Amino acid sequence: MNKLLLRFHQKLAVVGLLFCMAALVAAPLAAQTTVARGAGTTIIEGGTGSTGLGPYGPFTPVLTTVAFHAERNGRTITGSFNCLARAPEPPGSTGASQSALFDVNVMNVVGQITGAVVHGDKATLTGTATVTGVGAGTNLPFTVTVQKGGAGATVVLKVSGLTFQEILLDGGHIEIEDGER
């Protein structure tokens, strides 16, 4: 009787396992969804700051071109982040006019996004980046917090021990997925 009962339980376990495997195979694969994406030109609040930066005097304006996207596939976050900062020629440079010609590459951040958290109209994206110019290095951790919207939306980049508060100007747009995660 015990052997018969044992065989019955073994067969029941095999049938249960087969049902579980069938459910996993039949379940749809997790769809890739956009967490956040955007692009545009920003201006860094306060430019080079009250103490200046390198050859730049205090409050020299800095424009950036920023572009990013982050996707979620199940529990995995992937994406990329790019931010190119430009300033006018520093004072004392040959041909420097301190005009509105932002033609000097001050910093470039190129990174892979590996984390994302959405809270309302903001997303915080994290990853590692290669930085050239100010704060140069490779495989540096970065955090960028972006706000949904067009002109006036904010971008806050933290990398190389520096924090850049940026405001999106005309022509740019940032999208954030709905819902809190």
Image: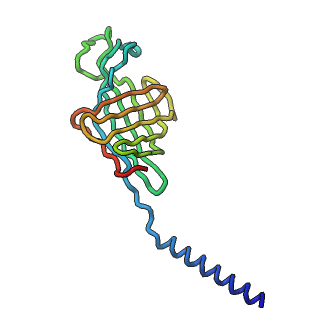
How is this picture coloured? rainbow
| Relative to 67, residue 20 above or below | below
Q: Residue furthest right?
A: 2
Residue placed most toward the observer, 67 or 125: 125
Q: Residue furthest top?
A: 92
Residue placed most toward the observer, 146 or 112: 146
Location of residue 112 in the rendering, given as x and y in whole percent from the top left corner: 45, 42
Location of residue 128 in the rendering, given as x and y in whole percent from the top left corner: 49, 38
User: Which residue sits at x=26%, y=33%?
Assistant: 152
User: Which quadrant would residue 65 be assigned to in this image?
Assistant: top left
Location of residue 167 in the rendering, given as x and y in whole percent from the top left corner: 30, 31
User: Which residue sits at x=78%, y=87%?
Assistant: 2
Q: Is residue 178 left or right of residue 117?
A: left
Location of residue 89 in the rendering, given as x and y in whole percent from the top left corner: 30, 16
Q: Where the N terminus falls, by quadrant?
A: bottom right
User: Which quadrant would residue 123 be assigned to in this image?
Assistant: top left
User: Which residue sits at x=49%, y=26%?
Assistant: 161
User: Which residue sits at x=42%, y=40%?
Assistant: 124
Q: How many marks?
A: 0
Residue placed most toward the observer, 47 or 67: 47
